[in-house]
Image: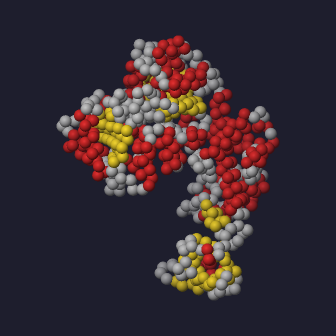
Amino acid sequence: MLSLQDSVSLITGVGPKRVIALASLGIQTVEDLLTYYPTRYDNFEVRDLSTAVDQEKLTIKGTVMSEPVIARFGYKKNRLSFRLLVDQDVVMVTFFNQPYLKDRIELGKDLAVYGKWDGNTARLTGMKLITMNNSELGAVYPANKQIKANTIKKFVETGFKQYEHVIATLLPPPLIKQYGLLPRAKMIQEMHFPSDEHTAKLARRSAAYEEFFLFQLRIQALKRENQTEDGLEILYHNDELKTFIGSLSYELTSAQKKVVNEICRDLRRPIQMNRLLQGDVGSGKTIVAAIAMYATITAGYQAALMVPTEILAGQHAENFARLFDGLPVNVGLLTGSMTAKQHRQLLDQIKHGGVNLIIGTHALIQDAVEYANLGLIVTDEQHRFGVNQRQKFREKGEHPDVLAMTATPIPRTLAITAYGEMDVSIISEMPKGRQPIETRWLRSNQTGVALEFVLKQLQQGSQIYVVTPLIEQSETLDVRNAEELYDNLKQYFEPQFKIGLLHGRLTNEEKDATMQAFKDNETNLLVSTTVIEVGVDVANATVMMVYDADRFGLAQLHQLRGRVGRGSKQGYCLLIADPKNQVGIQRMQTMTETTDGFVVAQRDLELRGAGDVLGQKQSGLPDFKVGDPVGDLKMLQTAQADATDLLATEDWDTQTDNLPLVQYLHRHQLQTHFD
């Protein structure tokens, strides 16, 4: 019995070599092939020559007036020419290097030709002869060196004929009726072989909605499945928690209080928490995480905080040791650079409960780490981790609660897609007294002005970050590099002020020593690549100066800007850039117009696209074939609501109309578990 899950090798004409070629495009099953949709359509509608524009691609139709003639010139080069009578005009048509077309061109026969029109000479450079198969739109497929677009088109045509009768509609009939969508077989047919422009648009809308709905169904099903698993009831000591919060030297903002309540409510529920905490740089996420971890510890559980770098892990360990001084919290720091003996001792303490707050890098989720009683895992800056990686964190211990934090504000679009299986909390306001950072964009010929400003700040006792994209000289990129810049700035500022250098090629020990010297104010100015981007906290730093700022993404620039102005002094961000294109200019303008991370993130998404913002392969963000999660946001939100409603409907999975959807979900949920 035929199935869309059959290998493409079962399609007539697809041999072993073609199977390999198709696999290079991600096409392995018949369904993969039939949903390998065209990226665009060539419009083969026959045009009146009086409306033709010079150098435009168009289709003309007429009668062949002269025998086709082939002229050869150069090695393997030739030109096929003939005259075509179009209404009352005679047009010279020329095809280059397609001599085999000669047999299809007969004197006195009608012919349609697609090509580029030269209005000055009334000539058409032919691209293809058109066979009018009831469609004026020709599908154009993405291809590669291993397989041509026309070959893909041929296999799609054959595959559709062979399997058309087994294409079941996946969407529930009420939704198809409500939105006026096409049944799946008709949708696939019209996507590849559209009857006309209107039907092609309807097929694309149907395909985009189907894609969004199926993705959201998988995500929401995963979310429901996680919520039915037995979680821990972390019955924290409320009085101890209130005393701790009351002992802080500042009052929490309303947004922080709201988020703390959401998290604490989750801790008490016997369902595994899976929550994303979003907040702009400096909004106070860390203290919220500290409160959650302390609550967990008062209930007799361990808490673990995972961060992306060893520098940040060390900083958190120091800060939490001070914060919890005098309380029954034993902090352990687990990183890859520990000695074997230190590592063994700490693992033993973690296993037997001697340490109840464990801070570290991804070493925390390695198999060798066994927890005595893990209640809460907090991940910081894990915005580059996808659904499956986050799932791995959840499998540590006996269903611990999970809180993921990110200071990279995520637009609604990406929150729905990349984090769709999580509950989301947002800290939407900044702590009292935190002044917005003043941002200036300067051209490279104004660098002297920037350095004079930096000198004044240094003379007032402040510290400075200077960031550059590359470590050493590159012939291909006209950008400053850290080492050259370091040498230049030493000449400018020393001996009065001490300059440090930090980049990715230093050993972990060298990085730690350099960063520690800056934190201790032994170094006044730190030249760095973006290794300082995430979470490093030096309250005395007031200026972030970024060379070749147009080489950085908006989210990265916003992160860098958030490193300064973290104390009582005003913070400044100086962007040195000579952008070569409009996108670079818009980035600089955005940075000077707003300090709101969510506005920055939305603009970044619009300028770069979803895949680039999160990093396509790492983000967990699906590579949608048809739907555009930015442009089709309303459709995406509607699909999320529809998928949630369906899963909440009693016995939806036993209704006959929904059986193809149930089978689809079962197949893909299994894939999710084994990815």
Question: In screen coordinates, is 522 left or right of 630?
Answer: left
Q: Is residue 378 visible?
A: yes
Question: Is 334 above or below relative to 623?
Answer: above
| Residue farthest along the left direction in this orientation | 495
Check the image and report above or below for 241 versus 672: above
Locate residue 248, reporting x and y percent.
43, 18
Between 579 and 366, the residue placed more toward the observer is: 579
Q: Position of residue 1 (x, y in %)?
A: 78, 52
Q: Identify the residue at image location x=24%, y=46%.
A: 488
User: Residue at the location (41% across, 44% down)?
Assistant: 592
Asked if residue 94 shows in the view, the reply is no
Work out which residue is located at the far bottom of the displayed protein and give it: 66
Say left or right for 300 vs 106.
Answer: left
Q: Residue furthest right?
A: 656
Quadrant of the image for the C terminus?
A: top right
Q: Nearer the viewer, residue 196 or 662?
A: 196
Foreground of the two, 27 or 321: 321
Who's the residue at 60% across and 82% down the image? Answer: 91
- Horizontal and vertical percent for residue 170? 73, 47
**Above or below: residue 502 compared with residue 578:** above
Q: Residue at x 59, y 41 (%)?
A: 417
Residue 525 occupies which quadrant of the picture?
top left
Apparent side of residue 401 relative to residue 534 in the rendered image (left or right): right
